[in-house]
Image (cartoon, rainbow, N blue to C red):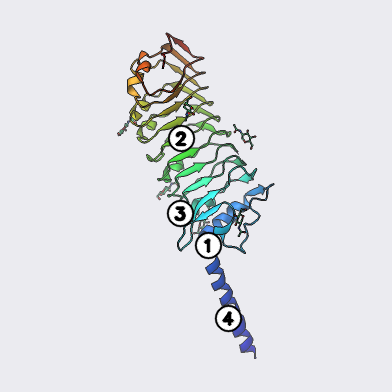
Amino acid sequence: MLLLVALLLLCNSTVGNVCCSRNQENSVDLHALLDFQRGITKDPQGALSNWSTTTHFCRWNGIACTTTRPFRVEQLNLPGLNLQGKITSSLGNLTFLYLLDLSYNSFAGTFPILNHAQQLQYLFVNNNSLTGIIPDALSNCSSLLSMDFSLNLLVGAFPPKIGFPPSLIYINFESNQLDGSIPNEIGQLQNLESLVLGDNRLSGQFPHAIFNLSASLRVLSLEKNMLGKTLPPNFGYLLPNLKNLSLYGNMFEGHIPASLGNALGLQLIDLSSNKFTGKIPKL
Ligand SMILES: *[C@@H]1O[C@H](CO)[C@@H](O)[C@H](O)[C@H]1NC(C)=O
Ligand SMILES: *[C@@H]1O[C@H](CO)[C@@H](O)[C@H](O)[C@H]1NC(C)=O
Ligand SMILES: *[C@@H]1O[C@H](CO)[C@@H](O)[C@H](O)[C@H]1NC(C)=O
Ligand SMILES: *[C@@H]1O[C@H](CO)[C@@H](O)[C@H](O)[C@H]1NC(C)=O
Ligand SMILES: *[C@@H]1O[C@H](CO)[C@@H](O)[C@H](O)[C@H]1NC(C)=O
Ligand SMILES: *[C@@H]1O[C@H](CO)[C@@H](O)[C@H](O)[C@H]1NC(C)=O
């Protein structure tokens, strides 16, 4: 009799385990998401109300998974939901994640180091209340195409080692409190199309390494900083594909490069509120 009960118990628990592992077959992803959920202190719209282990995490709000087994998290998409709390480093365990969009929320604290997120392509955490520095360790996200940290409270230098992966196409750090100069290593990002760094406290001279991006760079937005000194006369020839150039509200001086008139693709140019002499070329 006792044996029978024991057998029944064993059976039950085995079935339970099988059930569990079938339901939540990737426990690394499950634990990473549950850890992220624990980091959220306020969810006024109930955005995570169906984040419960009674359903597979691939069916939770904001999650998209691979369509074949083993089902892995590819997207964590929770913009504009008034979420409060911190972003946990456990998200770095989502090794299939390619889109992380937590923009337009109220996440605070520092942005974590995402150790194994090597598939991450899109990282949007703009318009939150993130503090601290932008981690150099993003260099390990070797597939990164776009990152938007704008409208936060980030401080410190532009990630100094800028070990950023050369895959990057879009960088937006606008409206933070970054200081120091723009590092020369920026010139290694040979695919960079948009560099948006306005409304910070960046200083030093115009980073000449940017001219290394002549083939790719289309949008350069450095307005409302403390950048200074002169621009080279051949500026317009050095960045022939530039469409938007915004340098207003800095301390640039000397002649406005006449060659800007030759940059035929320019759609927007704002050099106002500097100490330039000469005329702004007509587009
Ligand atoms: C969880 O909520 C989202 C958004 O409301 C919905 O699309 C999804 O089907 C829900 N999942 C389950 C298992 O109810
Ligand atoms: C990542 O997953 C491993 C298990 O695979 C676990 O030991 C570790 O604590 C997780 N890291 C984080 C930051 O959650
Ligand atoms: C940032 O988000 C808040 C709501 O969270 C919104 O009120 C504000 O307009 C947003 N700022 C910008 C510049 O989009
Ligand atoms: C980056 O990845 C390498 C190899 O995978 C690892 O040794 C290193 O610790 C990682 N760096 C950071 C900052 O995560
Ligand atoms: C310019 O780009 C080349 C690759 O085309 C790279 O080797 C070099 O380090 C870059 N120079 C600077 C100053 O970033
Ligand atoms: C570039 O300038 C045009 C014209 O003002 C504007 O419509 C567009 O939004 C700008 N693009 C970026 C990425 O700043």
Q: Are marks 2 and 1 in contact (CB under 8 Å)?
A: no
- Which numbered dot is residue 96? 3
Quarter of the image where the N terminus is located: bottom right
In the rendered structure, which amino acid carries the disc numbered 1? Ser
In the rendered structure, which amino acid carries the disc numbered 2? Ile
Quarter of the image for residue 167 reads: top left
Q: Are marks 4 and 1 in contact (CB under 8 Å)?
A: no
Q: Which residue is mark 2?
A: 171
Horizontally, is 11 left or right of 96 in the view? right
Mark 2 and mark 1 lie on one chain; the one further toward the N terminus is: 1
| Residue 86 seen in render | yes
In the displayed orientation, state which residue is furthest to the bottom.
1
Query: Dot 4, crowdedness within 10 Å: few (<14), some or many (≥20)?
Result: few
Horizontally, is 41 left or right of 197 in the view? right
Query: Dot 1, crowdedness within 10 Å: few (<14), some or many (≥20)?
Result: some
Q: Which residue is mark 4?
A: 11
In the rendered structure, which amino acid carries the disc numbered 3? Phe
- For residue 201, above or below residue 49: above
Q: Secondary structure at mark 2?
A: strand
Q: CA distance from mark 1 to mark 3?
A: 13 Å
Q: Residue at x 38, y 32 (%)?
A: 185
